[in-house]
Image (cartoon, grey):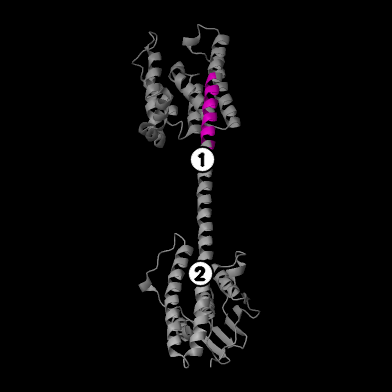
């Protein structure tokens, strides 16, 4: 293993990840090392090892190191307090020498530049004050100027090393962000390519289905015209229609599979049921009444068969309007009016409640249900209007163009 590979393994190894996830545990081990190094200073002949204050100062001198990555500012405050305490007891200075260096490095490595400058100035400013006003006996043999210069060299060194580490961490973080964004962009491009391909396949399948339906329409017209004069030819045309219908159904299933997104569940053919139309409106109104909402149903004009898509759209509009009244209308009465005309179908759902206006005015956005209704109506070239009624309540009004029914002969 090369030196670079060893460095990468140490940086990404399980031990490093364990310490990164548990900073207090890792720094506690470092604090034990600082405890031992600081204890070496108490081996001087003039210091009595039996002095109980020695162990107190050693503990206090190691505590900032143990909490430096969890509570950095408290660690800095404790270190400064330890420096002030050294003015009263020189043992405090000896126990905090290594802690000062570790905290100085941590400040420069962890904080932004301005905060790091301010914290470093506070730390070493107090250290300077301590050296000038109450220099420990162990340092009294050296001139104060020499001691100060030595400490300033240590301050610059710790700050420089910390800023280099800080810069590397920022660079690594930026590279990780760039890699993440690049990966997300790549995934987005792949998804976009898949969607483009799905749309292309859907267009092709649409053309195939449209062709089959055109053939079926032509064959049905021919079969109807020759049904009495040439039954064999009509039967052949009906057989062609049957075969083409099966093919069209298979292509439609493929088209739906292409258009279905990945998060949509697959639908078993055995679970498929006919979509409701306006013939099911009485059942819907009965269910809503059972739920506690009084509904008055009015049908104007003579009902006639509608295209299945238009009938389904009308049913969903009424269903959504009544559901919104149940959810948001509060105590209210609702009315449903269906008007059959020669060239259009008019649908109106009203209530006298007070809550549905929040669907459009509370957040400034239109609810998903209203958007769905508008999309359904727009599919058939119609118009949809929704909003509060002047006298109170809410109103859903839709106009859907339709082709007049034709009589077959």
Segment tinted magenta in the rendering: 157-174
- The secondary structure type at the circle numbered 1 is helix
Find the distance from the CA under tag 2 to the CA under tag 1: 43 Å
**Foreground residue among 389 and 287:** 287
| Outermost right residue | 390
Residue positioned 54% across, 57% down in the render: 196
Residue at horizontal 38 percent and vertical 22 percent from the top: 33
Q: Nearer the viewer, residue 328 or 310?
A: 310
The correct choice, above or below, for 290 with respect to 107 in the image is: below
Q: Does residue 239 appear left or right of residue 167 in this picture?
A: left
Instruction: From the top left corner, tell me how far across and down residue 63 is, in percent.
Output: 42, 28
Residue furthest to the left: 50
Decide if residue 320 is in sight here: yes
**401 in relation to 115, above or below:** below
Image quadrant assignment for residue 271: bottom left
User: Which of the two discs, 2 and 1, labels the residue nearer the N terminus?
Assistant: 1
Residue lying at 50% horizontally and 29% vertically, measured from the top left: 76
Dominant secondary structure, magenta:
helix
Q: Residues within 10 Å of mark 2 (few under 14, many from 20)?
A: some
SS for callout 2: helix
Looking at the rendered image, the quarter that the N terminus falls into is top left
Pinpoint residue 311: horizontal percent, then vertical percent.
52, 81
Which percent across, then down, holds residue 297?
Answer: 53, 87
Label ID, residue 208 = 2
Q: Nearer the viewer, mark 2 or mark 1?
A: 2
Q: Nearer the viewer, residue 94 or 152?
A: 152
**Does residue 55 lie above or below 210 as drawn?**
above
Give residue 190's position: percent from left, percent from top: 50, 51
Q: What's the mark number on residue 179?
A: 1
User: In this rendering, does residue 325 appear at all?
Assistant: no
Q: Is residue 173 magenta?
A: yes
Q: Is residue 180 above or below residue 363?
A: above
């Amino acid at each position: 293993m090369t030196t670079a590979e060893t460095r990468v393994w140490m940086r990404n190894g399980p031990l490093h990840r364990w310490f990164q996830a548990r900073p207090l545990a890792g720094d506690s081990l470092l604090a034990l090392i600082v405890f031992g190094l600081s204890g070496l200073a108490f081996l001087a002949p003039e210091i009595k090892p039996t002095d109980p204050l020695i162990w107190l100062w050693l503990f206090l001198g190691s505590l900032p190191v143990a909490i430096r990555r969890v509570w950095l500012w408290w660690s800095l405050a404790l270190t400064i307090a330890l420096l002030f305490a050294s003015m009263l007891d020189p043992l405090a200075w000896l126990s905090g020498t290594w802690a000062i260096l570790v905290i100085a490095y941590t400040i420069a490595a962890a904080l932004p530049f301005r905060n790091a400058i301010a914290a470093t100035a506070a730390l070493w400013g107090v250290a300077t004050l301590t050296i000038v006003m109450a220099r420990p006996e162990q340092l009294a043999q050296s001139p104060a100027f020499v001691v100060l210069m030595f400490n300033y060299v240590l301050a610059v060194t710790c700050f420089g090393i910390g800023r280099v580490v800080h810069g590397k961490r920022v660079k690594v973080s930026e590279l990780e962000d760039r890699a993440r964004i690049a990966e997300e962009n790549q995934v987005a491009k792949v998804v976009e390519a898949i969607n483009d391909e799905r749309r292309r396949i859907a267009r092709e399948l649409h053309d195939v289905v449209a062709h089959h339906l055109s053939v079926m329409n032509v064959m049905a017209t021919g079969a109807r015209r020759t049904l009495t004069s040439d039954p064999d030819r009509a039967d052949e045309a009906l057989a062609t229609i049957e075969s083409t219908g099966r093919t069209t159904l298979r292509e439609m299933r493929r088209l739906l599979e292409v258009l279905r997104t990945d998060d949509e569940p697959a639908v078993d053919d055995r679970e498929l049921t006919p979509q409701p139309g306006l013939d099911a409106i009485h059942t819907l109104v009965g269910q809503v009444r059972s739920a506690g909402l009084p509904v008055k149903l009015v049908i104007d004009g003579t009902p006639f068969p509608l295209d299945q898509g238009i009938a389904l759209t009308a049913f969903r509009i009424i269903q959504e309007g009544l559901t919104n009244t149940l959810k948001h209308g509060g105590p209210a009465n609702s009315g449903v009016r269906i008007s059959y005309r020669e060239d259009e179908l008019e649908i109106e759902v009203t209530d006298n409640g007070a809550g549905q206006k929040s669907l459009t005015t509370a957040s400034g956005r239109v609810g998903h249900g209203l958007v769905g209704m508008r999309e359904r109506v727009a599919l058939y070239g119609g118009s949809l209007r929704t909003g509060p009624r002047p006298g109170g309540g809410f109103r859903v009004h839709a106009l859907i163009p339709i082709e007049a029914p034709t009589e077959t002969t």
